Image (cartoon, rainbow, N blue to C red):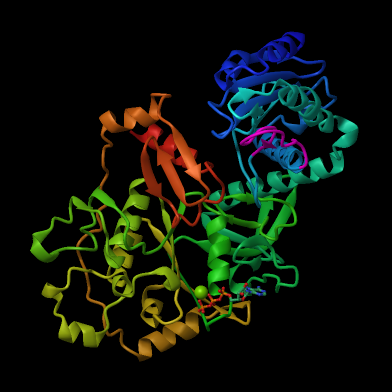
Amino acid sequence: MKKLKEMLNKLDGKSYGGYKEIRGRYDFLDYTLEILRVQGDSFASPSLFSVEIKLLKYGYSKDYYDNPSKKVAFEDYILRKTNKLISKLGKKSGSGKSGQLNILSPKQEILKRSAVEIIDDTLIIKFYGGLPANGRRIASRGAIEMIFNEMPKISKELKIPRVNLDKLQQHIKTNLKSDSIRRAIKKENLIVFIENNSKLARTSSIDDRVLKDGIPFNSPTSLEVTLHIDNDDTVTGMGISKGITVITGGGFHGKSTLLTAIEKGVYNHISGDGREGVITDRDTVKIRAEDGRWIDGLDISNFINNLPHKKDTHNFTTANASGSTSQAANIMEALELGATTLLIDEDTTATNFMVRDRKIQELIPHKKEPITPFIERIESMKDKDISVIIVVGGLGDYFSMADRIIMLDEYNLLDVTEKAKIISDKFENSNVRGVTEKFNIPFRKLDPQKTNKIFISDRCKIKTRGLDELLVDKENIDIRHLEQYVEELNGIFSVLISFNNKF
Ligand SMILES: Nc1ncnc2c1ncn2[C@@H]1O[C@H](COP(=O)(O)OP(=O)(O)OP(=O)(O)O)[C@@H](O)[C@H]1O
Ligand SMILES: [Mg+2]
């Protein structure tokens, strides 16, 4: 600690690169500070620091983190608390990002993150700080102020009287309950569970917090289940089994809101979010059309064949996919990675990928149409144990193959399976050919020459720009349409890890 101060004093006024010397670990009175990465100049992305505290010394009992579910919740709670504090800390002093402190901003989901981790009884908090400069010169006074006055407030804030243990317990309890429901739905062979009284509507499209006066969720009796969870507790709500589920209803009646809650149910949510009891099997992927996307060497022949100029769809590459080919690609990529449930909302699909009505069939004969629409494939996918939950407001032809049909009526959910089936029998489906070919899920081996760089070499840089863009080395990947990607960098790593385990 003293050594660091001396080093900083000596560096005053020297060129910015001199800061590299201060990398290392320093023991403070009741925590260890590590300077992990030093920025190249005051305008570059800020330097990376960590503060390590010994939990038992700080008076936390192991009971707060003695299983993975508690541990994730505890880490998540600490991140939320530190984030609130850090946004008030840091004094801008000098050029560029001098003196500014920041840490990842969590949203509504409880997630495992590298920003806060407990390893053996040590809590490690990683955050960014802009090492102060005057122009291109080191400003030691600012650096000493940041490291010796501002940063110690982080560990101080985590001392027990300042941490509300009741709130922490509540946070942990919420996560334990969600994980417990997750285990229960696996046991009961359900893919989705929505607890009665959940609140699914959000404040706005850019504010993911609960809409306070939203209508609470209430399961139709026919789909209501009671699950036995830990601590001899039970939860009651709607259970969706495998197979084909259609969600229908009039415009603005809450269909997409329900599907979005299901899609986010792959994550646990913080207490008060309204979706703590909405739990979806983790192998569930939201699919949408994404025209303009890049496709590289993918087999989309389950859906697309006979493209103009005999373009091969068993090994399809394009820098500019159409609506239908992009949706086919999104499905095939999800299945290749092990998805077993697909979520589709009519709002964000390519219509010609979903159905072909009689008039279109009359004008464009099958041999001239490359697309085998999803409606003609959905049953062969079910034979492969792939479940689909699909929102339809205009495509009633999906009623005939559905295992259950639920309808939103002014945000209230009804089971209309029987009624819809009668209607479906009354009006013959105009556009469904019996497609008998098996649905084929291919499996690409990744090219180790390319992937080693990501999985093995630590020189590969992975960065994100908000929720829109992922940078792998110098390659930009547009991820705007990954709707289940909720927080910077999270999720991407789990995708990479799952790739790594598979190949
Ligand atoms: N349970 C609810 N309580 C209150 N408001 C809700 C509820 N569910 C949804 N809403 C609100 O109703 C509006 C319409 O919802 P949503 O977009 O889900 O409708 P939709 O049925 O998908 O409509 P469309 O068919 O036009 O796509 C949104 O503003 C949404 O926030
Ligand atoms: Mg909608």
Identify the residue at the far right of this view.
Answer: 161
Q: Quadrant of the C terminus?
A: top left
Q: Quadrant of the N terminus?
A: top right
Residue 33, percent across and down? 70, 20
Asked which quadrant contains residue 81, the reply is: top right
Q: Is residue 178 above or below residue 388?
A: above
Residue 89, percent across and down? 77, 37
Please state the extent of the stretch shown in magenta in the rendering. Answer: 88-103
Q: Is residue 161 above or below residue 336?
A: above
Q: Is residue 61 above or below residue 26?
A: below
Query: Is residue 231 visible from the viewing direction of this image?
Result: no
* Residue 370 painted magenta: no
- The secondary structure making up most of the magenta span is loop
Identify the residue at the far bottom of this view.
Answer: 426
Is 274 in front, or is 387?
274
Asked which quadrant contains residue 119, the reply is: top right
What residue is at 81 percent from the left and 30 percent from the top?
153
Total marks shown come to 0
What residue is at 12 percent from the left and 64 percent from the top?
306
Residue 404, percent across and down? 48, 72
Is residue 324 toward the left or the right of residue 460 in the image?
Answer: left
Residue 97, percent across and down? 63, 36
What residue is at 53 percent from the left and 82 percent from the top?
251
Is 48 in front, or is 62?
48
